[in-house]
Image (spheres, helix red, strand yellow):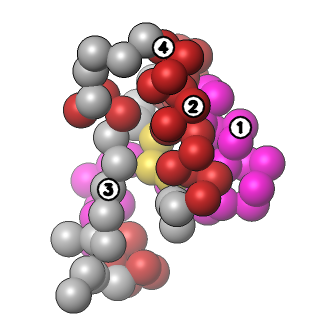
Amino acid sequence: LFRSVFNPGEHPGRDIGASLAIDLAWICLIAECLVVLPEWENSKGAVAEYRAAEAIGLPVHRYNDDILVKLVKVYGRSG
Protein backbone atom coordinates (compact mmCIF):
# COMPACT_ATOMS: atom_id res chain seq x y z
CA LEU A 1 0.00 0.00 0.00
CA PHE A 2 2.61 2.56 1.03
CA ARG A 3 6.19 2.83 -0.09
CA SER A 4 7.18 0.73 2.91
CA VAL A 5 6.06 0.03 6.45
CA PHE A 6 8.41 -0.76 9.31
CA ASN A 7 6.94 -2.51 12.33
CA PRO A 8 9.58 -3.25 14.99
CA GLY A 9 7.25 -5.86 16.49
CA GLU A 10 7.75 -7.98 13.38
CA HIS A 11 11.49 -8.30 14.04
CA PRO A 12 11.81 -10.34 17.26
CA GLY A 13 14.98 -11.90 18.59
CA ARG A 14 17.12 -8.79 19.02
CA ASP A 15 17.90 -7.30 22.39
CA ILE A 16 15.98 -4.13 23.21
CA GLY A 17 18.94 -1.83 22.57
CA ALA A 18 19.59 -3.20 19.08
CA SER A 19 15.89 -3.14 18.24
CA LEU A 20 15.50 0.46 19.37
CA ALA A 21 18.62 1.56 17.47
CA ILE A 22 17.32 0.03 14.23
CA ASP A 23 13.84 1.43 14.84
CA LEU A 24 15.03 4.98 15.54
CA ALA A 25 17.41 4.92 12.57
CA TRP A 26 14.47 3.97 10.33
CA ILE A 27 12.38 6.82 11.73
CA CYS A 28 15.15 9.40 11.41
CA LEU A 29 16.49 8.40 7.99
CA ILE A 30 13.68 6.76 6.02
CA ALA A 31 10.20 7.36 7.46
CA GLU A 32 7.83 9.88 5.92
CA CYS A 33 5.54 9.80 8.95
CA LEU A 34 4.92 7.92 12.19
CA VAL A 35 1.63 6.24 13.05
CA VAL A 36 1.08 5.60 16.75
CA LEU A 37 -1.29 2.94 18.06
CA PRO A 38 -3.84 3.38 20.85
CA GLU A 39 -2.22 3.61 24.29
CA TRP A 40 1.22 4.25 22.77
CA GLU A 41 1.98 6.46 25.74
CA ASN A 42 2.32 3.30 27.88
CA SER A 43 5.23 1.92 25.81
CA LYS A 44 8.77 3.16 26.42
CA GLY A 45 9.68 2.23 22.83
CA ALA A 46 6.70 4.05 21.33
CA VAL A 47 7.46 7.12 23.45
CA ALA A 48 11.04 7.08 22.14
CA GLU A 49 9.72 6.80 18.57
CA TYR A 50 7.34 9.70 19.14
CA ARG A 51 10.05 11.90 20.67
CA ALA A 52 12.42 11.16 17.78
CA ALA A 53 9.74 11.98 15.21
CA GLU A 54 8.86 15.16 17.08
CA ALA A 55 12.53 16.20 17.28
CA ILE A 56 13.04 15.96 13.52
CA GLY A 57 9.65 17.41 12.55
CA LEU A 58 8.22 14.15 11.19
CA PRO A 59 4.41 14.10 10.96
CA VAL A 60 2.80 11.90 13.61
CA HIS A 61 -0.65 10.37 13.08
CA ARG A 62 -2.81 8.50 15.58
CA TYR A 63 -4.10 5.18 14.27
CA ASN A 64 -7.86 5.00 13.73
CA ASP A 65 -10.27 3.51 11.21
CA ASP A 66 -9.75 6.32 8.68
CA ILE A 67 -5.98 6.66 8.89
CA LEU A 68 -5.15 4.48 5.87
CA VAL A 69 -7.42 6.52 3.60
CA LYS A 70 -5.89 9.75 4.89
CA LEU A 71 -2.32 8.53 4.47
CA VAL A 72 -2.91 7.34 0.91
CA LYS A 73 -4.19 10.82 0.06
CA VAL A 74 -1.20 12.52 1.72
CA TYR A 75 1.66 10.17 0.81
CA GLY A 76 0.30 8.24 -2.16
CA ARG A 77 0.56 4.58 -3.04
CA SER A 78 3.66 2.69 -3.98
CA GLY A 79 4.36 1.78 -7.62
Q: Please give the residue where the numbered disc 2 appears in the rendered image.
A: 21
User: Residue 46 at what x, y percent from top left?
Assistant: 53, 28
> What is the magenta range?
47-69
Q: Quadrant of residue 51?
A: top right
Mark toward the start of the polypeptide (1 vs 3): 3
Mark 1 in CB contact with mark 3 (< 8 angstroms): no
User: Residue 29 at what x, y percent from top left?
Assistant: 60, 59
Mark 4 in CB contact with mark 2 (< 8 angstroms): no
Distance CA(mark 3)–CA(mark 4): 20 Å
Q: Quadrant of residue 69?
A: bottom left
Q: Amino acid at mark 1?
A: Arg
Element on which disc 4 rests: helix
Distance CA(mark 4)–CA(mark 2): 8 Å
Mark toward the start of the polypeptide (3 vs 2): 3
Q: Please give the residue where the numbered disc 1 appears in the rendered image.
A: 51
Q: Please give the residue where the numbered disc 3 appears in the rendered image.
A: 5
Q: Nearer the viewer, mark 1 or mark 3?
A: 3
Mark toward the start of the polypeptide (2 vs 1): 2
Q: Nearer the viewer, mark 3 or mark 2?
A: 2
